Structures are given as C-alpha cells and as structure tokens.
C-alpha cells in the first residue's frame, strides 16, 4: 500500500538539510522500490512571505493526509517582530496540536569517535544512549487561560500548567513500552515537591508501573534530573517528562553529544503517524553557507521509515551508513576538530556510497 510523505523544508538551514535528506530518500525509493508519494510544500517564514501565513490551510490538510511529515526548521530574525499567530514557530506548535502528536521521542546518543566534541570528559560520556519521551500537546505551552495583563499596575502575566489523567497515561504508556524495548529502566521527571500537576503526574505513573513489572521505575525532580544529566548521564535509559521539563532536558541531553546537528526526533500520534525533525533550529547565522550538518535530518528520515512507513530494514541501512560515515572519519564543520570537513551538500553522496557498498 502506498505511503504519503510530506516534506516541509521551512526556513534557514532547514532548506539545506532537507535537500540532503531528499537526495538520500530519492536514492532509497529507487534502490528498494519503495511505494512512496512525496510532496514538498512551504511552511514557517517562507510560507508567510509567500502566502501570508506560516501554516497555510492546504499545507495543514496535506499533513493530515500524510503518513509521515519530514520537517526541516522554522524561524529567523526577519520574522521576530511579527505577532505570535503569524510567527514561523507557530506553524510547528500548530502542526503538533492539529495532528495530535502527543509523544515526542528524542534520542541522545554519542558515537564514541566523537567524544572529543562533547563538553564532558570521555569517561563520563562514552556509550551515551538515552531516549527522552516528552509529552508534546499539553502542559504549560498549551494551557488556558494565558495572558499578559497590560492595564494594571504593576503589569503581570500568567500561564496555566494543566494535565488530565488520560494525557499522563498515554505518554507514560509510550515511555514504559519504549523502556521494555531498551534496557528496562524508566525515570519519570516532575516537580512533585511544589506543583500539584506534578503530584498527579507522579501518582498516575507510579500506578501504571504495576502493569510493567519488567521496567524499573524511578522518579527525579526536574532540577536534579538536569544536574544528573551532566554529572552521570549513563545512569539513564528512558526519561519521561511533561512538555516544559521534557523540552529543557532534551536540549541538555542533545548538547552532551557534542552537536545538536546529529540528533533526530519523532513526534507521534496514537496510530504512529508522525512528524520527524532534527533537534536543531533554523540557525540563521550559518544559513546559506553550506555548513549545516544534515545528519539529524537524514536520521529523522530513518525514524520515519521505522515508526510510520513500515520500512525498518531500510531504516537500519541509514543508521548503519551514518555509523560507518563517522567511523571512516568523515566530519561536518560542527563536529570537526580541524578544517578538514564536508560541506552540507557533500554528505548525502557519501552516505549513499556507503549504502551502495554494503
């Protein structure tokens, strides 16, 4: 049965890394006779400039019809002064909400050959392999009411952090099942010492643990978890957290690997349709310079093949190629220790050659 893929390059380096990913995807479709329908459309600031909206209705409708959305990056200084409803970043949050992408999977792993790029010592960071499961459509980013009150003295602002039991259960289920497929350890992160919403979170996750006797459950407060990720990251296997805490912890974990340009992510709905994107942003400072690392985008394609497109063996081909790419000494600027590095446009052809030679 044919699968539908929507590609949304977005802004900044999103355009460049997506071009590299498409080069790999086109090769894989031909080599393995994959029955994919691939459509490319505009999103973010690029879409705003063309159509007056960061997420045109036809793009949203196409996303809803797709089995996988491959998303580059959005944002840039030229759109910083726009109202929030037309800011490029609003397209990303709207897609997550409209597609019911409640589960964000962000792996943080280190190729030991790149340990020198990490800010941590090798003996601390070597063999890093963590999965952070972040709740993506609830919590303080989406809670209502929210407001900046300008007509009072002093001015004030407020947001609402809210989760119901069902939202906690569905993300915890993803986390427990992920731990079952890995090393059987799950750490739930909250602030149950001060937040009522976290007290409910901890209670629900603890209750669910009885259904997963093969998973060792622990709890950490968010501030301590952030510290532990730096002091002893290999104590973790799978981490589950709310939207806010998961956002912070996944960025810390990504930084440990030496380059956020290496790390993919998946955002899934209950039927495992999803949106896949690199963990990095649009990086306007290097946009257009052919310096961006496209590995995270290409690895996001690998996650799409595995979770949404039913092609796990082809996904493995990409993962093995990336591993061999690193072992062979190929580097992009962000992970190079000297001036000998590949430009963005050179990476895909190297990976394709590695797959061809297998």
Image: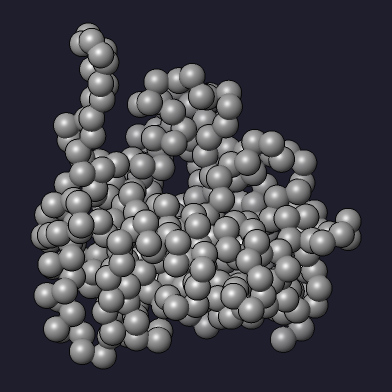
| Along the line of sight, the residue nearer the viewer: 206 or 230 | 230
State whether residue 327 appears in this view.
yes
- Total labels: the figure holds 0
Task: State left or right for residue 297 relative to residue 346.
Answer: left
Location of the C terminus (image quadrant): bottom right
Image position, residue 51 (x, y; %): 47, 25
Residue drawn at 35 percent across, 26 percent down: 85
Task: State left or right for residue 262 relative to residue 4.
Answer: right
Q: Height in image: 233 above or below 103?
A: below
Q: Which colour scheme is used?
A: one colour
Residue drawn at 55 percent across, 76 percent down: 128
Image position, residue 304 (x, y; %): 46, 66
Location of the N terminus (image quadrant): bottom left
Q: Quadrant of residue 221?
A: bottom left
| Along the line of sight, the residue nearer the viewer: 246 or 193 | 193
Image position, residue 262 (x, y; %): 62, 62
State whether residue 106 appears in this view.
no
Image position, residue 160 (x, y; %): 19, 38
Q: For the view shown, which residue lies furthest in the bottom direction?
A: 214
Task: State left or right for residue 211 relative to residue 140.
Answer: left
Task: State left or right for residue 355 relative to residue 231.
Answer: right
Q: In which quarter of the image is residue 337?
A: bottom right
| Along the line of sight, the residue nearer the viewer: 221 or 28 | 221
Residue drawn at 33 percent across, 49 percent down: 244
């Amino acid at each position: 049965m044919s699968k539908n893929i929507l590609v949304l390059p977005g802004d900044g380096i999103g355009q460049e890394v997506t071009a590299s990913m498409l080069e790999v995807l086109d090769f894989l479709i031909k080599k393995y006779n994959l029955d994919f329908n691939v459509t490319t459309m505009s999103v973010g600031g690029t879409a705003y400039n063309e159509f007056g909206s960061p997420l045109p209705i036809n793009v949203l409708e196409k996303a809803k019809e797709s089995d996988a959305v491959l998303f580059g990056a959005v944002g840039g200084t030229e759109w910083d002064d726009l109202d929030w409803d037309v800011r490029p970043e609003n397209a990303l949050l709207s897609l997550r909400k409209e597609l019911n992408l409640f589960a964000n999977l962000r792996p943080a792993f280190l190729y030991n050959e790149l340990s020198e790029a990490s800010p941590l010592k090798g003996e601390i960071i070597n063999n890093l392999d963590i999965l952070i499961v972040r709740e993506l459509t609830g919590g303080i980013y989406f809670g209502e009411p929210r407001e900046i009150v300008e007509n009072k003295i002093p001015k004030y602002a407020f947001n609402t952090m809210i989760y119901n039991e069902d939202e906690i259960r569905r993300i915890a289920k993803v986390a427990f099942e992920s731990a079952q497929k890995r090393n059987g350890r799950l750490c739930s992160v909250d602030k149950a010492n001060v937040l009522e919403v976290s007290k409910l979170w901890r209670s629900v996750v603890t209750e669910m643990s009885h259904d997963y006797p093969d998973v060792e459950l622990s709890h950490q407060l968010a501030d301590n978890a952030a510290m532990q990720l730096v002091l002893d990251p290999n104590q973790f296997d799978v981490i589950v957290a709310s939207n806010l805490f998961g956002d912070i912890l996944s960025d810390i974990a990504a930084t440990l690997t030496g380059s956020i340009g290496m790390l993919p992510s998946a955002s899934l709905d209950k039927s495992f349709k999803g949106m896949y994107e690199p963990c990095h942003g649009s990086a306007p400072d290097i946009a257009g310079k052919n310096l961006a690392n496209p590995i995270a985008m290409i690895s996001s394609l690998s996650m799409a093949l595995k979770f949404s497109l039913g092609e796990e063996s082809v996904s493995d081909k990409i993962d093995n190629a990336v591993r061999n790419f690193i072992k062979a000494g190929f580097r992009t600027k962000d992970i190079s220790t000297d001036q000998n590095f590949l430009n963005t446009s050179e990476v895909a052809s190297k990976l394709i050659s590695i797959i061809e030679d297998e």
